């Protein structure tokens, strides 16, 4: 059973990309020869969470390219996950779209991945759009404080538990899974939540479960203290647009915009939308698309 979400559009094409033995599922909207723009989703999501935004980019002349990160959606699960592996995957997807510099859009974790990728290959991207993706913790929070809980016995046991119990994390019905996701995203319309469940979950003999690997969404995915990146943001060369949701949610990054602004590169455009939450491109899809297209100019 699937639902129809008004304004959503399925990809025009889907393909698989082999990245050092890991199969990544890639979705594309728009003409095959149109200039590409890369879309990076957040943790626990998949490429189809751009079903509202990507069609608007395609209709404006872009080729929107999104992929399921490893351990998410229809991409392969792996034995281990790391932040660095996600960045390498991102760069591999970008390379599969051509060699010219391209703009990129990242939501939440996807925005943070893009910021790291720019530091590795600054010439690869022409412009960056971060949708509530200034994913950096407060500058006043030390790395030791940040990692103390994760590296404690209880923190490690929780991560190991995700590995052991991943085959048992299921729900008896589709609606039960919808209800579970709705609790995490109370601001989103139910039609959207059902859309995410339709494309981000699967049904088996024991019930409904998310396609993503629970280990891939655990906090312990490699060393990436935000303070390392914070001091380097000012040297970011691509043009930057950051849209921040003003309504703080449980899934939002625990940092105030005023703490990040002094570290942003010169000329960065930063907007706080007080009436929307973490999923700005879902709560306000038309406004988000309009603002992004104005920033990217013409293809």
Image (tube, grey):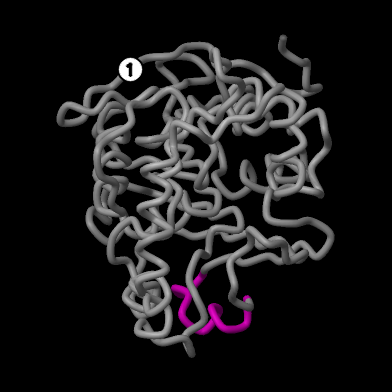
Local secondary structure at mark 1: strand
| Residue occupying image coordinates x 35% and y 63% | 156
Report whether residue 58 is seen. Answer: no
> Taken as a whole, is the magenta stretch helix, strand or loop?
helix
Crowding around mark 1 (Cα neighbors within 10 Å: few <14, some 14 to 19, many 20+) is some
5 to 42, vertically: above or below: above
Q: Disc 1 designates what residue?
A: 16
214, 44: nearer the viewer: 214
Report the side of 273 relative to 75 (left or right). Answer: right
173 to 78, vertically: above or below: above
| Residue occupying image coordinates x 59% and y 22% | 199
- Residue 241 placed where, x, y %? 56, 58
**Which quadrant is the N terminus positioned in?**
top right
- Residue 25 placed where, x, y %? 38, 22
124 to 178, vertically: above or below: below
| Residue occupying image coordinates x 68% and y 44% | 281
Magenta region, residue range: 257-267
Residue 56, quarter of the rendered image: top right
| Residue occupying image coordinates x 57% and y 25% | 201
- Residue 177 placed where, x, y %? 69, 31
213, 87: nearer the viewer: 213
Image mark count: 1
């Amino acid at each position: 059973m699937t639902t129809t979400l008004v304004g959503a559009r399925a990809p025009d094409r889907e393909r698989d990309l082999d990245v050092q033995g890991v199969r990544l599922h890639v979705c594309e909207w728009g003409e095959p020869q149109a200039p590409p723009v890369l879309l990076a989703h957040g943790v626990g999501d998949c490429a189809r969470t751009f079903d509202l935004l990507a069609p608007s980019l395609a209709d404006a002349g872009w080729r929107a390219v999104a992929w399921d990160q490893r351990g998410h959606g229809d991409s392969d699960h792996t034995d281990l996950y790391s932040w660095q592996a996600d960045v390498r995957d991102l760069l591999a997807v970008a390379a599969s779209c051509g060699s010219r510099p391209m703009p990129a859009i990242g939501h939440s974790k996807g925005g943070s991945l893009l910021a790291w990728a720019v530091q590795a290959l600054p010439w690869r991207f022409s412009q960056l759009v971060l949708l509530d993706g200034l994913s950096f913790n407060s500058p006043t929070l030390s790395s030791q404080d940040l990692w103390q809980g994760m590296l404690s016995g209880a923190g490690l046991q929780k991560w190991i538990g995700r590995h052991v119990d991943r085959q048992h994390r299921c729900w008896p019905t589709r609606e039960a899974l919808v209800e579970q996701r709705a609790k995490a995203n109370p601001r989103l319309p139910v039609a959207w939540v059902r859309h995410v469940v339709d494309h981000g979950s699967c049904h088996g003999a024991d019930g409904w479960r998310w396609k993503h690997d629970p280990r891939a969404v655990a906090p312990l995915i490699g060393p990436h203290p935000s303070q390392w990146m914070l001091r380097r943001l000012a040297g970011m060369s691509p043009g930057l647009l950051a849209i921040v949701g003003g309504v703080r949610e449980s899934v939002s990054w625990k940092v105030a915009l005023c703490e990040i602004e002094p570290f942003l590169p010169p000329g960065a455009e930063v907007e706080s939308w007080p009436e929307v939450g973490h999923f700005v491109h879902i709560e306000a899809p038309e406004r988000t698309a309009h603002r992004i297209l104005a920033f990217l100019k013409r293809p």
